Image (spheres, rainbow, N blue to C red):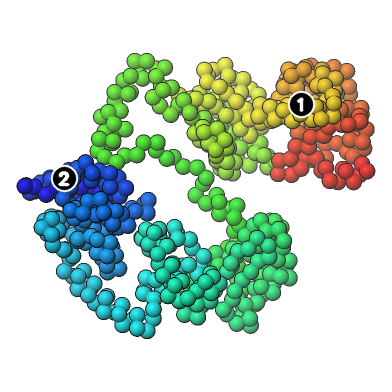
């Protein structure tokens, strides 16, 4: 009668290799596979295996911890743990959980097969060399316990806990399950008689497990230093306090980031300081650099740390757990789907990512309030827009930053990419080219083309204005609106208001009011001047504000003066649209208008 084996490992390649190995044996039959220990619990009920070959730890935190549950439901099953770890601690943990054997993944095929046969007969198996190390480790553990109540593994967990790591982080660092990490923590606190984390940190410092410990708090920054106050490191807190870094509102972190010793043999510390803003970080760094013996190697903050490696990634919707999964997701099975789309192109919407994919396209010429910074520098903004699509709309968006500002090249590139996407989102392309690009793409493509700087801004402004008018008791058709900024956002907003029912909208660029009499306007501004300004006003933006009910600032800062705002009608509405730098300075203007 053959030995029925259930293979449990989170790596499909490992499972496939084990299945082929065991299938070649006459007396062993691989009856199933599982990628998680929890799956093995359910599969064992129907497959009735004799031996479960299980990985020591899984990404979901299971592994050895699932052995007691397996044996409780199936006491006749033998568990053979398969691991890459030759640490006696894991061997001890496996046998204490109820496993019958422990074999290394790097072991020879004959050893794995022999271990399965041994545990199936009711015996116990561990590699001879590893067994000898286990005996030696047990002896060392007993001797150490007489002098120190903590094991070597628990001392390492104590050090990581004192550094502020969570149970999940410790589990990943030590290749143990989260439950095991929690158990170690409880044992440490109980053995040492500790009640708080502060006591735990003090004990770690007393034992020499740490040199420097820092903590974060929501108010003033706190730091424990083990060096003498006369050392260079010990003088950093006083320099920091001179720069005013003990602030009530902390929003950024300044780090001199490295660990251990540099190549020149100097001590390198990772110092975390709570600061108010970017300028405050600069003052802190300048103050620290005045301390003799201190060199600031690198400065970062939590915003830069959030962007490390980018903010978006591709994650498959269908996991590949077996060879069958791979054959359906890729060749040969995918060929059938390709032929179906070739026969009926409309099926691309149902059978591919196209139905939920959007391209976020820019040339980097009008990025936020930064201007023409190029496609590489625009990439973080486009990644952020992709996150908004995913988090707020469940749409998979991807940033596409083009290294060209030629409208013809941009249009050709987007048309060539269009088969992949269900929509095109144009972003941060400078006017007036953005108008031409959007118009040509709308004519050429059969998918939605959305220019965020135009339509997105216009929609938000209209919604805010309708709500504001209701508050002040006015109607859109009766108010006089002044828009400063005749670029993409300003032009689209003005047209959106006109379509919504506004009858008196005046647009201004950086020079003057847009009116039919101006000869310095490009074709797009000339068209906007003809569509707006029904009273044919001329002059500056301040002149247009006289008696106006609504001001929408979509230009650079300083477009209007406090006197101009003061000349507006009663219960006036002012939208100063901020992007990086305020285009409208409300606090200053309120003081000037008072």
Answer with left or right where residue 142 lies relative to residue 544. left
Residue at image point 63% right, 42% down: 373
Residue 322: x %, y % from top left: 26, 40
Q: Quadrant of residue 511?
A: top right
Q: Residues within 10 Å of mark 2 (few under 14, many from 20)?
A: many
Which residue is at the front of the view, 164 or 21?
A: 164
Residue at image point 50% right, 68% down: 163
Q: Quadrant of residue 453?
A: top right
Q: Quadrant of the C terminus?
A: top right
Residue 43 in sight from this viewpoint: yes
Q: Which badge, 1 or 2, comes first in the chain's sequence?
A: 2
Which residue is at the front of the view, 190 or 487?
A: 190
Residue 74: x %, y % from top left: 22, 51
Name the residue that disc number 2 marks: 30
Above or below, 46 against 434 in this view is below
Answer with left or right where residue 460 lies relative to residue 593. left
For numbered disc 1, what is the local secondary structure?
Answer: helix
Residue 503: x %, y % from top left: 82, 17
Q: Tell me, yes or no, whether the two marked residues, 1 and 2, touch with CB atoms within 8 Å.
A: no
Residue 482 in sight from this viewpoint: no
Q: Residues within 10 Å of mark 1 (few under 14, many from 20)?
A: some
- Residue 466: mark: 1
Which residue is at the front of the view, 592 or 116?
A: 116
Above or below, 138 against 58 in this view is below
Residue at image point 50% right, 70% down: 162
For numbered disc 2, what is the local secondary structure?
Answer: strand
Q: CA distance from mark 1 to mark 2?
A: 68 Å
Q: Quadrant of residue 484?
A: top right
């Amino acid at each position: 009668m053959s030995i029925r084996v259930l293979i449990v490992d989170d790596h499909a390649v490992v499972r496939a290799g084990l299945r082929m190995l065991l299938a070649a044996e006459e007396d062993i039959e691989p009856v199933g596979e599982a990628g998680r220990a929890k799956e093995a619990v359910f599969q064992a009920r129907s497959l009735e295996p004799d031996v479960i070959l299980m990985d020591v730890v899984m990404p979901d935190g299971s592994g050895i911890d699932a052995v007691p549950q397996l044996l409780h439901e199936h006491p006749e099953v033998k568990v053979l743990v398969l691991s890459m770890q030759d640490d006696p601690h894991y061997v001890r943990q496996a046998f204490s959980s109820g496993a019958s054997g422990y074999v290394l993944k790097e072991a020879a095929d004959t050893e794995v097969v022999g271990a399965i046969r041994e545990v199936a007969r009711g015996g116990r198996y561990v590699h001879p060399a590893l067994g000898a190390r286990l005996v030696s480790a047990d002896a060392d553990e007993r001797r150490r316990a007489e002098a120190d109540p903590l094991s070597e593994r628990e001392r390492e967990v104590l050090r990581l806990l004192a550094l502020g790591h969570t149970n999940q982080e410790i589990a990943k660092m030590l290749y143990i399950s989260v439950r095991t990490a929690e158990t170690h923590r409880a044992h440490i606190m109980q053995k040492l008689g500790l009640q708080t984390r502060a006591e735990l940190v003090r004990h770690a410092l007393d034992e020499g497990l740490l040199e420097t410990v820092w903590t974060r708090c929501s108010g003033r920054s706190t730091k424990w230093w083990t060096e003498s106050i006369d050392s260079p490191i010990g003088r950093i807190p006083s320099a920091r306090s001179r720069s005013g870094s003990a602030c009530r509102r902390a929003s950024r972190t300044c780090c001199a980031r490295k660990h251990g010793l540099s190549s020149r043999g100097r001590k390198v510390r990772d110092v975390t300081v709570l600061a108010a803003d970017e300028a405050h970080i600069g003052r802190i760094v300048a103050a620290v650099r005045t301390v003799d013996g201190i060199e600031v190697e690198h400065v970062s903050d939590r915003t830069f740390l959030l962007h490390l490696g980018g903010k978006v990634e591709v994650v498959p919707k269908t996991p590949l757990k077996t060879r069958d999964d791979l054959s359906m997701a890729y060749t040969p099975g995918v060929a059938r789907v390709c032929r179906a789309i070739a026969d009926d192109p409309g099926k691309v919407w149902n059978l591919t990512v196209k139905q939920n994919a959007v391209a976020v396209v820019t040339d980097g010429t009008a990025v936020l309030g930064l201007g023409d910074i190029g496609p590489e520098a625009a990439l973080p903004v486009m990644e952020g827009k992709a996150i908004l699509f995913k988090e707020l709309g469940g749409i998979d968006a991807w940033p596409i930053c083009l290294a060209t500002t030629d409208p013809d090249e941009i249009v050709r590139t987007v048309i060539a990419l269009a088969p992949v996407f269900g929509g095109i989102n144009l972003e941060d392309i400078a006017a007036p080219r953005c108008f031409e690009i959007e118009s040509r793409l709308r004519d050429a493509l059969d998918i939605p083309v959305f220019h965020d700087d135009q339509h997105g801004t216009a929609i938000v402004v209209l919604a805010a204005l309708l709500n504001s008018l209701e508050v002040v008791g006015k109607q859109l058709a009766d108010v006089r609106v002044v828009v400063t900024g005749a670029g993409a956002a300003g032009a689209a907003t003005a047209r959106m208001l006109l379509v919504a029912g506004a009858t008196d909208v005046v647009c201004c660029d950086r020079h003057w009011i847009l009116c039919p009499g101006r000869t310095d306007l490009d074709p797009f501004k000339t068209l906007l001047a003809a569509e707006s300004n029904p009273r044919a006003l001329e002059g500056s933006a301040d002149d247009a504000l006289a008696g106006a009910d609504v001001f929408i600032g979509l230009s650079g800062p300083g477009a209007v003066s406090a006197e101009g705002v003061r000349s507006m009608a009663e219960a006036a509405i002012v939208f100063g649209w901020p992007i990086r730098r305020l285009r409208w300075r409300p606090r200053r203007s309120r003081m000037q208008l008072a």
